[in-house]
Image (tube, helix red, strand yellow):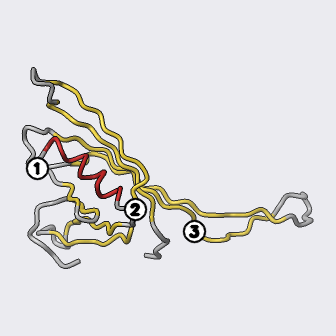
């Protein structure tokens, strides 16, 4: 992805995570690696482990939306769900600092599948609209990508 003057932190498909929209405050990235025990006689009679390849990669995102401050704020989580309901892997990229600390460049992380979306609405106004929406989204890598 080429450098851009767009103002977002991360993009999943067409959905943009941004300070003025759905902003995340926590990212949890996990990678697993597959090992299988092979029965083999050894001095201690313990199995030998054999590496059989990379396992699942997951990314959990937690964030917060202040609907009164974000354009289309009450619909942000609905927009995430629309992306998920497409039933297709989505390109994930994020902005990281460029060398020298000036500006940023996009980094493509490959295609990811949305496996879960949760939301919690709190601090309700008299009309029933929330002043705060917290959300979490779980992603799974579509395929392994060696970096």
Total labels drawn: 3
- Do the CB atoms of the residues marked 2 and 1 lie less than 8 Å apart? no
Expressed as whole percent of the image width and height from the top left, the position of residue 16 reads 20, 59
Q: Is residue 35 above or below residue 26?
A: below
SS for callout 3: strand
Whichever of labels 3 and 1 marks the residue nearer the N terminus, that label is: 1
Which residue is tagged 2? 87
Q: Which residue is rendered at x = 85% and y = 58% of the image? A: 46
Whichever of labels 2 and 1 marks the residue nearer the N terminus, that label is: 1
| Nearest-to-viewer mark from 3 and 2 | 2
Q: Is residue 64 above or below residue 55?
A: above
Expressed as whole percent of the image width and height from the top left, the position of residue 89 reads 39, 67
Which residue is tagged 1? 20
- Do the CB atoms of the residues marked 3 and 2 lie less than 8 Å apart? no
Query: Relative to 6, is 95 on the left or the right?
Result: right
Q: Farthest top residue?
A: 126
Q: Which residue is rendered at x = 32% and y = 69% of the image? A: 91
Q: Quadrant of residue 124?
A: top left
Q: Quadrant of the N terminus?
A: bottom left
Which residue is tagged 3? 54
């Amino acid at each position: 992805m080429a450098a851009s003057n767009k103002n977002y932190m991360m993009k999943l498909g067409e959905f943009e995570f941004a300070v003025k929209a759905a902003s995340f405050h926590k990212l949890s990235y996990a990678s697993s690696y597959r090992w299988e025990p092979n029965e083999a006689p050894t001095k201690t009679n313990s199995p030998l482990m054999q590496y059989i390849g990379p396992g699942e990669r997951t990314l959990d995102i937690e964030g917060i939306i202040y609907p009164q401050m974000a354009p289309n704020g009450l619909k942000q989580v609905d927009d995430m769900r629309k992306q998920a309901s497409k039933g297709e892997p989505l390109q994930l990229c994020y902005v990281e600092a460029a060398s020298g600390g000036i500006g940023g460049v996009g980094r493509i992380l490959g295609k990811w599948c949305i496996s879960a979306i949760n939301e919690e609405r709190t601090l309700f106004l008299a009309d029933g609209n929330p002043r705060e929406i917290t959300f979490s989204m779980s992603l799974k890598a579509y395929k392994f990508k060696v970096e």
